[in-house]
Amino acid sequence: MANINVAKAPIRRDAHAKILGQATYVDDLQPKGVLFGATIRTRLPGGRVESVRLDPDWNWSEYILVVASDIPGKNAVKMLDDDQPILVDDQFRHAGEPVMLLAHRDRKALHAALSHVKIEEVPCILPVFNIDDALASDTPVIPHNVYSQYLLQKGDLLVGEGECDVFVELRSETSAQEQLYIEPQGMIAQLLPDGRLRVEGSMQCPYYVLDALRQCLGWEEAQIQVVQTTTGGAFGGKEDYPSVVACHAALLALKAEGQPVKIVYERSEDLRVTPKRHPSRTLIRLGATREGELCLIDIDFAIDGGAYRTLSPVVLSRGVIHAPGPYHCANVRVLGRAVFTNHPPFGAFRGFGAPQSILAMEIALDQLAVKLGMDPVTLRRKNLLRPGLRNATNDVQSRDCFALDVLDVALARSKFDEKQAAYACWNQQAGDTRRGIGLACFAHGAGFTGNGEVYLASRLSLTLLPDGMVEILCSNTEMGQGAATTLPQIAAEELGVPLEYVRFPAVDTSRVPNSGPTVASRTCMVVGGLVAAAAKKLRNKLEERGLDFEPLDLEQYRIYCAALCAEMGGELRVSETYQAPIGMVWDEKRFQGRAYASFAWACYVAEVEVDMTTLETRVLKITAVQEIGKAVNARIAQGQIEGGVVQGIGWALFENIVWNKEGNMANDRLTNYTIPTSADIPEIDVVFLEKGLGAGPNGAKGIGELPMDGPAPAILNALHNALGITVAKLPASPELLLRLFQRNPESV
């Protein structure tokens, strides 16, 4: 349940079509004469392709074949660095890299042909699959096997050490996690009669795909049209990889001379080769006085970037910034490294590095409380940020700091003290189960880090049509998070017209300006702010013509719109460009200043029960309290929190990617990659505090990533409360708990 009235919030615009099965996804599209594409991939975890052999007895005349030499532009996926080939020509770094593309009109014939292609591979490197092994390697593939290294420093660690009476050290490890979007990766490419290339499919970031196609083909932007189809979920997994699939489909379509080509991955292929959440390893040392004042936070945070750089530097950046948590400490050091391994590249996933680093801090705080003989709540309360204090990046906290507020509400709402006492009594009875309660405090920055939004300079437009309808023209996509509802809501409220008068058309790069990617919890806050500003500008133009909005007469409104559009040649378009908030100063090299325009603040409480026979953990309840500025649509906001909590539970307890000897995902089926089902979802009590101080419309903040940060550390701290053992590795499976008990037989 939630503490705000969701019944008054508009229902999602895409709800009925999806519930009734009427939404059209990329694999529902069947262009006339469509060919189906498939990919031939490497098998070894790095080496050199010596040759590609086609079975001479197979009839290849009906197939379209594409290899690296067929790429007319640059053979590199357009990302932060051009180190990942679109198709392997010679050297490769991981098993599953694409070498050849095939297309055929019949899917069965296409799949049959795959076994008639043989790639001769020569291993030329000793693969590494572990962060610490990669850092210690004498034969690094890239310098020191490190893609990026960042250092956040505040104060002096030596001074901090001298002030400390108590220290704790902890090693935390987190696993990879599959986004498991409902619809696998898929794209359709075809040459249009006018010579342009049209690519449509499932994606988060159409302009990323456009830029990748431009580089791959060597074409101008005007020659390429990228269109988002209904997208069955993304969670970050469709941020960068759609660029790969789009380039592959486009190359086949060019060679097919006019026939459209569709590539839609089977689920097992999608699981094996697409990016997942970065595994991480964190070494953390905390120091405090006897009274519990933090004097030292020293963190070595490393993420597994996989075989290519992709988005790892920006994931690492957010992880480093969030690592010290919402706490005040005079002496902080966070060393962050994104490390090369021979796994397929890792990429974006909800939370974007912050869940991994926050986990270590929150577990270590509970261990510090034990060593101090102090309650974990008391320790947090003593050190949480409040207005006037400086955070780890030396940003002075303003009145938009609610770390203590969310803690107090979470304790009261969950009846924390009462439950803690009750569970202690339960455990003393030595029955078949143990129960525990734990919490995690955290904050999550919305939008791109630092100057990222300034560099991006997002633009969008609102178009007024003669019938009074308004279209939002932006590159931000609906991918299940509700943007197709919330952005029109913002426009309608600012303009003063009914919601049904605002449209959110499918994103088409030939029509819409670049308002940035749909990532980083930025859509509602940043893009919503642009929508509100453009709507206000449009309303002013109508008011200048004498239209009275108080109250609005819809018939008069349509008359005014028709007249104004006639003067403008058929329609009126107003545009808006992003402007950074006043006082937003960020030093990218030193990690100092204000990292984000707004932080959302949260405290999550988890209650668990452990079966002492099987060591299976059941989550009894999650209390999720967050200050989000303002909920634009309470129904959608609640769904965002609930969905993120369930993903966090899966990451904490169930989801375990098993790697084979080649470094690929071995459990690449939904039968053996375990995720939470409805039977595993506990009561989720969602509580919103709305102080209205965010950088978005009416003070809104971004919340998409926020709920991923809290469940795992709260659950692991609850396990510590229940079992008396420190759990600092994910997933906290029965097997892991058994190993921990074997090392600590006196725990229970």
Image (cartoon, grey):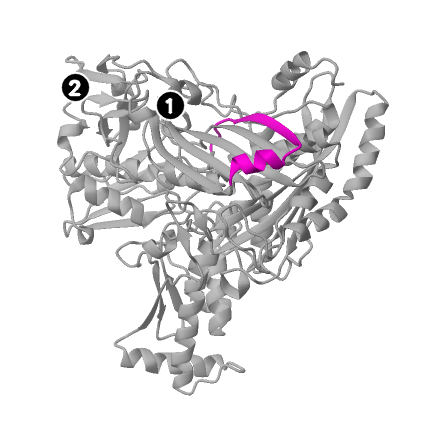
Classify residue 184 as left or right of residue 105: right
Residue range of the region highlighted in magenta in the rendering: 156-178
Depth order, front residue of 32/474: 474
SS for callout 1 = loop
Mark 2 → mark 1, Cα distance in angstroms:
35 Å
Query: Label 2 amino acid?
Result: Asn
Residue 647 part of the magenta-drawn span = no
Q: Position of residue 378 (x, y in %)?
A: 73, 42
Instruction: Tell me the crowding category of disc 2: few under 14, some 14 to 19, or many 20 or more residues within 10 angstroms, Cα based.
Output: few
Q: Earlier in the sequence, mark 2 or mark 1?
A: 2
> In screen coordinates, is 290 left or right of 267?
right
Percent x, y for residue 346?
39, 31
Residue under label 1, please give it.
343
> In this orientation, does residue 623 appear?
no
Residue 145 lies, with reference to residue 214, above or below; the image says above
Query: In the structure shown, which secondary structural element does the residue marked by tag 2 occupy?
Result: loop
Residue 373, placed above or below residue 190:
above
When asked about the image quadrant of residue 312, the answer is top left
* x 22%, y 39%: residue: 250
Q: Give the quadrant of residue 566.
A: bottom left
Q: Is residue 620 visible?
A: yes
> Pointer 2: what residue?
59
Q: Which mark is residue 34?
A: none
